[in-house]
Image: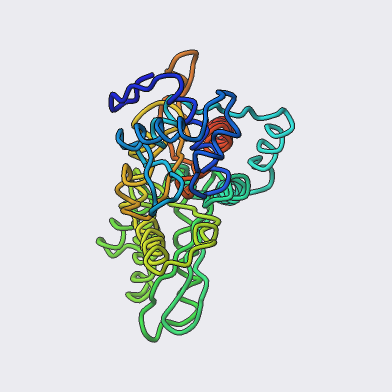
């Protein structure tokens, strides 16, 4: 068969590459010709298999990590495996029901539901689970300012869709606790039917026209609260929920690798990374797989990402399928992640969340 890069493999080479990658996914260890000879029903000697492996190495699909070792797949070899050689597992009915139950929103906010989905994926995949939560365009139901100590307060916003957002703001020196109550009461009296952007525009006009009946310090709190909520969401982007990060640091003894992954965490927490993830989810229909250096987020950290879009909006696609991308869900793991298991789990979870949000 031919890979996207045009590498043609005969049947024997295909079987050997597939078995080598599957063993690597299971163990993370280099695979030798003797092991492949015992496992493959080809009747080939280790010497014959070494000849084929030499051809695969020359084609850039496998490599030797050190002298006299077995072979490991390159990122190019993994891409060929994922695109054409991978045999996907199928979810059982019990697994589907369990995923649907974990994603159910009964009695929970949207943010809590998505966080639970991210945690669930982390556990099922043995990797870090992530969700790009959609930016809510729902009306605001309640705003509250909670004092955290001198100079700081927590702004809590509850949307009509149940989504909750929290942000910490700095408060002016000398602000009395009663000012936080006044700020909350002022905003809650103006919420009816307004989204956050609409509320921010209305309040901005009133403050500019000096029509708030609030003192200058309280006006500052109102502006800071609305500004940090609107800015934190990021227009058209959403927020990133990441769970299970520690799984990416397991069994790592190389300081450079640990530092690379910690840098990845920092980049994922940045707003531009959230936008990048959404762009990746929009590149095509269904699940997208990014291996190693194919993803600019990963640099040389030896990681893969499996991501799928969360869809919603009017059913304008084939069969009434929604086409608007509201967010994304997926996992980040080592390049030897169990693709055959992870891909259907991510795909089905994305479909469940799309139904929930659609």
- Looking at the image, is 257 positioned above or below residue 112? below
Give how far across and how far down residue 271 sits, in percent: 34, 55
- Looking at the image, which residue is at 49% across and 63% down? 252
Give how far across and how far down residue 177 sits, in percent: 50, 79
Q: Quadrant of the N terminus?
A: top left
- Looking at the image, which residue is at 48% across and 30% down? 16
- Looking at the image, which residue is at 38% across and 53% down? 67
* Residue furthest top as drawn: 319
* Residue furthest left as drawn: 208
Give how far across and how far down residue 306 sits, in percent: 46, 40
Q: Is residue 357 visible?
A: no
Q: Nearer the viewer, residue 115 or 16?
A: 16
Q: Nearer the viewer, residue 300 or 176?
A: 300
**Is 155 on the left-hand or right-hand side of 233?**
right
State the colouring used for the structure image: rainbow
Please count the marks in the image: 0
Give how far across and how far down residue 262 sits, in percent: 41, 64
Q: Is residue 20 visible?
A: yes
- Looking at the image, is 250 positioned above or below residue 5? below
Q: Nearer the viewer, residue 194 or 166?
A: 166
- Looking at the image, which residue is at 47% across and 50% down? 334
Q: Nearer the viewer, residue 6 or 90?
A: 6
Residue 34 falls in image quadrant: top right
Residue 236 falls in image quadrant: top left
**Is 135 on the left-hand or right-hand side of 46?**
left
Residue 54 falls in image quadrant: top left
- Looking at the image, is 348 positioned above or below residue 146? above
């Amino acid at each position: 068969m031919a890979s996207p890069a045009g590498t043609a493999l005969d049947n024997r080479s295909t079987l050997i590459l597939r078995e080598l990658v599957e063993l690597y996914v299971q163990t993370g260890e280099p695979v030798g010709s003797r092991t492949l000879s015992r496992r493959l029903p080809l009747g080939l000697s280790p010497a014959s298999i070494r000849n084929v492996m030499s051809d695969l190495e020359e084609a850039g699909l496998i490599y030797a990590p050190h002298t006299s070792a077995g072979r490991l797949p390159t990122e190019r070899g993994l891409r060929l495996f994922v695109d054409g050689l991978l045999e996907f597992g199928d979810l059982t009915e019990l697994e589907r029901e369990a995923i649907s139950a974990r994603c159910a929103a009964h009695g929970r906010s949207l943010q809590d539901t998505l966080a639970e989905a991210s945690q669930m994926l982390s556990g099922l995949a043995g990797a870090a689970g992530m969700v790009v939560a959609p930016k809510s365009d729902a009306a605001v139901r309640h705003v509250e300012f909670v004092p955290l100590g001198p100079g700081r307060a927590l702004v809590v916003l509850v949307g009509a869709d149940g989504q909750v957002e929290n942000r910490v703001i700095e408060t002016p020196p000398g602000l009395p606790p009663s000012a936080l109550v006044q700020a909350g009461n002022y905003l809650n009296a103006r919420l009816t039917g307004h989204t956050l952007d609409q509320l921010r525009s209305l309040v901005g006009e009133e403050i500019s026209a000096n029509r708030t009946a609030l003192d200058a310090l309280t006006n500052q709190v109102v502006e800071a609260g609305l500004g940090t909520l609107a800015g934190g969401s990021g227009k058209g982007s959403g927020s990133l929920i990441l769970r299970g990060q520690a799984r990416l640091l397991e069994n790592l003894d190389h300081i450079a690798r640990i530092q690379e992954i910690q840098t990845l965490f920092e980049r994922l927490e940045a707003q531009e990374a959230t936008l990048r993830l959404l762009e990746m989810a929009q590149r095509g229909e269904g699940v997208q797989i990014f291996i190693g250096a194919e993803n600019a987020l990963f640099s040389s950290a030896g990681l893969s990402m499996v991501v799928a879009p969360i869809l919603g909006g009017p059913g304008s696609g084939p069969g009434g399928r929604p086409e608007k991308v509201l967010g994304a869900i997926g996992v980040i793991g080592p390049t030897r992640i169990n693709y055959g298991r992870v891909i259907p789990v991510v795909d089905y979870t994305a479909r469940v969340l799309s139904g929930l949000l659609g």
